[in-house]
Amino acid sequence: MAHISEEQIAQWDLIDPLAEKREAFTLPANTVYLDGNSLGAMPTAAALRGKQVLEHQWANDLITSWNTHSWIDLPATVGEKIAPLIGAAPEQVICCDSTSINLFKVLASAMTLQKNRSQVLSLAGNFPTDLYMVEGLTALLGESHCHLKTVDEDTLEEALTSEVAVLMLTQVDFRTGRLLDMQRVTHLAHKQGILVIWDLAHSAGALPIALDECDVDFAVGCGYKYFNGGPGAPAFVYVAKRLQAHVSQPLKGWMGHKQPFAFAQGYEQADNITQYLCGTPNVVSMSVLDAALEVFADVNMQQIREKSEALSELFIALVEAEVALSDLVLVSPRATKDRGSQLAFEHEHAHGICQALIELGVIADFRAPNILRFGFTPLYLRYQDILTSVQILTQVIQQKVYLQAQYNKQNKVT
Ligand SMILES: *Cc1c(COP(=O)(O)O)cnc(C)c1O
């Protein structure tokens, strides 16, 4: 890779069509934030909305706010804001609960549709909560009605047989950033009569997604990663319109009822995506997410993808050009088209390096046992931030800063 000059990098920032989006965020000084794939940075509008909801809506308008400030409509309003960002036509996405809980709902829905099949197929490297939720459903339904099979990616396609009831995949691998081909895999699964659930945790808000076009059955995703909805922000769920009249989900809370305020004796499910609601929406955090999503109103996901690719390619080029960094082993796919918006490197001292980086103002994260993970969020990162982060990484590794005792303590959250 040819040498990349500081002038060249400054020039990329000057011509970056997303450059001014950074101003929509409140960011700490002297920090390069490379962890937006775990917890997005705070859009300033999110803080203002939070304050307004607490101090004005809740404090003054109290319970009348359910109507006057449309609190009751938030799950649908936020769902419709997310829909175009993941390639979904209206009335198929709703905001509620957490990704884990939404996975349980759609897993149960899908298994109920597949009367004579019991296998849930996934990848062995999937995010643990996704696999745990299948275990939970197995415990409830019994092994003969639901059991998990996991394979490695290289044997995924041959495992798509008529034995499989549901294929549950995460589009972008949380460790390596590996991006699966949604269109192809969904198509191959459908040919075998398999229903497909996609977890968009590390892809929604980071790259263009075409759920409708790929004919996906169900999807779930996070509000607090690339959607910047704040810690513990509610998640979302997508159910294809063509399935909505046929599905049901087991968490039959009153908000999923056809007429919640009829307070009827028996449960009658709403005949649309609303049936995926369970209880009362978490109004404060859902409002914050609603405001945070406004930063996406005037950008398209293709623009975001292009900058994400450029930022990560720059990071790799700078790492590869630095002899002191030759012990970092890229475990993400080398081809940009096969990656989401993050890079993972293996290093024997990954944990200590990550702690030292954070101390020096470069926030990345560590994934056991030896992975350093860097997330690239085009809405608030500059090309110069990539240069700064690789310079600091070089300093940490060259000077073996990571060996210092203070960088080798284990925190509860990594
Ligand atoms: C982040 C993430 C989750 C998080 O689930 P929560 O219920 O929000 O804790 C789930 N699945 C994947 C693949 C993730 O990356």
Image (cartoon, grey):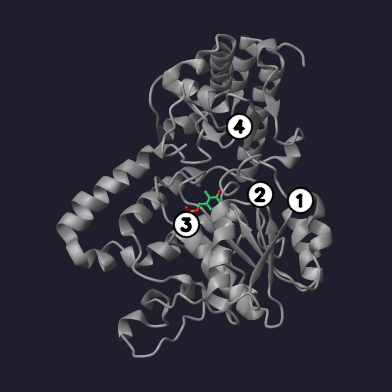
The answer to whether the residue labelled 2 contacts the one labelled 1, judged by CB atoms less than 8 Å apart, is yes
Question: Disc 4 marks which amino acid?
Answer: Asn
The residue nearer to you, when weighing 70 against 267, is 267
User: Mark 3 or 2 closer to N-term?
Assistant: 2
Q: Residues within 10 Å of mark 1 (few under 14, many from 20)?
A: few
Question: Disc 3 marks which amino acid?
Answer: Ala
In this figure, what is the number of numbered marks?
A: 4
User: Mark 3 or 4 closer to N-term?
Assistant: 3
Q: Is mark 3 within 8 Å of ligand 1?
A: yes
Tell me the SS state at disc 1. helix
Residue 375 position by quadrant: top right
In the picture, the disc for residue 235 is: 3
Question: Disc 1 marks which amino acid?
Answer: Glu
Which residue corresponds to mark 1? 153
**Distance (Cα) linking label 2 and label 1:** 9 Å
Which residue corresponds to mark 4? 370
Lateral position of residue 244 relative to residue 291, left or right: right
